[in-house]
Amino acid sequence: MTDMSFTPTTQPGDWASDQEVRWCPGCGDYSILTALRMLMPSLGTEPRNTVFVSGIGCAARFPYYMNTYGIHGIHGRAPAIATGLAMARPDLDVWVIGGDGDMLSIGGNHLIHALRRNVKIKLLLFNNQIYGLTKGQFSPTSEIGKVTKSSPMGSLDAPFNPLAVALGAEASFVARTHDMDRQHMMDTFQRAHAHDGAAFVEVFQNCNVFNDGAFEGVTKKQNRDANLIPLRDGEPLRFGADGEFGVIDEAGCARVVHTADVSDEQLLVHDEAKHDPSTAFMLARLARGPFEPTPIGVFRAVRRSEYAMATTRQLAAAQQKQGAADIAQMLRSRGTWFV
Amino acid sequence: MTDTASRELPLQEIDEVIIRFAGDSGDGMQLTGDQFTSISAALGNDLSTLPEFPAEIRAPQGTLAGVSAFQVRISDFDITTPGDAPTVLVAMNPAALKAQLHNLAQGGALIVNTDAFNERNLEKAGYASNPLDDGTLDDYRTYPVPMSQITRDAVAEHGVKPRDAERSKNFFALGLISWMYTRPVEPTLEFINTKFRGRTQVIDANTSAFKAGYNFGETAEIFEAHYEVKPAPLAPGEYTNVNGNTALAWGCIVAGQLARLPVFLGSYPITPASDILHEMSMKKNFGVRTFQAEDEIAAAASAVGAAFGGALAFTSTSGPGLALKGETLSLAVSLELPLVVLDIQRGGPSTGLPTKPEQADLMMAMYGRHSESPLPVVAPRSPADCFDVAIEACRIALKYRTPVIVLSDGYLANSSEPWLLPDVDSLPDIGVEFATGFNGTNEDGDGIFLPYLRDPETLARPWAIPGTPDLMHRVGGIEKEDGTGNISYEPENHQLMVDLRQAKVDGVDVPDVEVAGDVDADLAVLGWGSTWGAIDAAAGRLREAGFEVAHVHLRHLHPLPANLGDVLGRYRAVVCPEMNKGQLCDIVRARYLIDVEHIGKIDGVPFTTGEVTDAVRKRLEALATV
């Protein structure tokens, strides 16, 4: 997906800060960090023009490990901080990193509003379906019945489907990837970066301490063929080692079928630029959890007015109409008199 | 104005008048008051206004809850308050009369729209009998005027629907009062033409109603005289009439120009602060970016993000919003970024009295964040002072890289006064330099950037904005190592950083406080914020009565002026009127062990001059007997 004619001015190492990475050994966050550091040189940007913003949680330590500008903010508020930054500085590349608790629980409000405004920030949700930093309580993406320290008899909370939330919030770019496939992560992050607007990427991320193996059903090598449905724009949804499975639209519901049982024309053809989000929503909800066939890749990528640039255009229009800044004129705008 | 020969009524010169227009929220009382204010300003009177409106947008018509009022005081001398009791009350309906009569000075003039005093309206206002003829108004000079009927007759020729005809009655009232106080008619006719441009019928109706009111005064033989208030001896120069929220918004915008920084405002609508968001949203040609956030927290958080990006960032709110912003402000304290918070205080707790002022957020501004989270606090003392205080808050925020809270209130926000326009060229340069290069070296002797290496004088850290080559760095809410800004949990380092953050705020360059009035008096009145006008006027009255009074008014509440303890320590007694339960009293007592006596009032109405005068007089008399 990278432009081969482009000559990088940086190396992955230029994007690594001098700080010791302190996630638990074996944490899925390491592979995401590596993917991003490896991707960065190919994006045609510089560390000095890049800002990572985060809230609170394990994932939120991310900015410390990138040799860019960074804000490690407060719990849930990273999308709001990033919105202000992106509005004030549309020239920057602004990434937001957060976990499922950070972005979908305490910060759920900021997430949906950043997405609906379509401000140019890249939101990477490291979903591990558990609270890690507070040592193992159920999260807004944990499955019903999950036994944790705060739910000894099983969680009663119905979980959020992060992609469905993002689509419901009118996100113009929605994608999913997982921490066991570096190339897929890099490709997906690259697409998010290239998107002119808010980009939301859910990353299935393994917390090997508090929720080990949560995504194994789909991300483990031997399970991928059967349970990962790669979304490729313009292509029929077909998966399995020999393409023996496919996805059809059955009266508005996505359903997995044996391709042998249907004609090729019946398979859903993926159209990420389709403005109506219904199909993307249907695909987002195809799997009940990471134990059955689950689509990954770009669900939706549509063009919509970008917020920071729209703001800038209003400033320019106002200057055209009202003239340049003139303090003396402003102070007299409500009428004056002389004594 | 009129074709008929006017009666020869005596023209009496008076030094001031306090008029209160009161009617239903839909009656246009704010517009009427505003216009009367504008004409009087142009005539050169000193003036001060006090709008009062219900929290409900449209409370049921004719009810007490729906009464909206506008008080304006005009004078031929220097005034600092909108006056205690109106001397003229214009009541457009029974509810307005019921809600406002207690404010009217004994013997004051009462102009009543008699047409509105029908059974239904009387009942809605809770009158068992008609106050116009049951003796309720015996203590006042009552002028019954059938405003609705005359207005309907006056506008009939313009083909206005009967239902809409009465809507012009506020202009009738304005015309009548304009006649009573010999205001020129042309400015109002021009105003009507501009305000309702393109709506010919409305212009015609309002013009006719206004003229009918003016002519009524002249020809209806119920008034004994009309009056003249001569111009006040204001300092020469160009004036505008400004309210506190506008002055605050303008101050923020101008501060951006003075600092040569783009202005960013993150805000969530809240009474009585929303007008700041409105005003700044209209100034996009100044490069002002306004962001109406999803909530109060996002409003503050977006401002933090913008500040990191190099903007002069603001967030505006009122008490409930400041509470929500608390955690974000403590992040700003930790990140040590410039940020100005505008808190337009209102009555609380909880939703409280959204449209009424209070000064009860002082402790929250000072201490309302978790842990040790010090930040400077400043407060304007009058509507026009909001402009200077906004610039001062920005100066401190930028110079010391710190959030600063401005404590205005609902009284300053909406009341207005003439403001001698500042010489734009004489405004201070508050610009600061962004960091552009390394400020340290590592063990190998290579240049490095230390984001928490402080300026030895101000203790401010460098402000390196994204885009600057080589200065990439991370800031965060986790405790940072002195100098490098790296995460540090070391006990000694935390102690050091807590001490440094406090020392930085303690070291803010605050000018010494000056004593107004009788420096050598036995008693000083200490105040802050919007009580200035009432205290200043009360001190004047007491001086006229032969007392000596000193007045110490604080603009900087944190840190306090360095000389404050010494100054207050000189007085035998210090009293402090505040619209709270004694918050500044507690701070000053704790800080200086000075026995400041609290004069409190939390009824949603600003202190009157009389209230302050009486309370201080009591204390002065007690002192005299000791």
Image: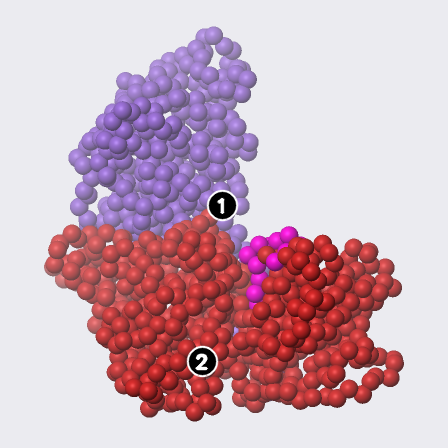
Q: Is residue A178 above or below residue B270?
A: above
Main SS of the magenta part reads loop
Amino acid carrying label 2: it is Thr
Q: Does any portion of residue A124 appear in the rendered image?
A: no
Q: Chain of mark 1?
A: A
- Could you tell whether A65 is left or right of A115 in the image? left
The range drawn in magenta is B51-64
* Residue B240 position in % (x across, y down): 58, 78
- Which quadrant of the figure contains the C terminus of chain B? bottom left
**Crowding at mark 1 (Cα within 10 Å: few <14, some 14-19, many 20+):** many
Q: Quadrant of residue B157?
A: bottom right
Residue found 49% across the figure and 67% down from its top: B605
* Residue A84 position in % (x across, y down): 42, 54
- Which chain is tinted red? B
Q: Is residue A76 above or below residue B520?
A: above
- Name the residue that disc number 1 marks: A117
- Could you tell whether B524 is left or right of B75 in the image? left
Q: Quadrant of residue B417?
A: bottom right
Residue found 19% across the figure and 61% down from its top: B497
- Which quadrant of the figure contains the N terminus of chain B? bottom right
Q: Chain of mark 2?
A: B
- Name the residue that disc number 2 marks: B613
The residues tagged by marks 2 and 1 sit, at their Cα atoms, a distance apart of 54 Å
Amino acid carrying label 1: it is Arg
Q: Does any portion of residue B422 appear in the rendered image?
A: yes
Secondary structure state at the residue bearing disc 2: helix
* Residue B598 position in % (x across, y down): 35, 72
- Which chain is tinted purple? A
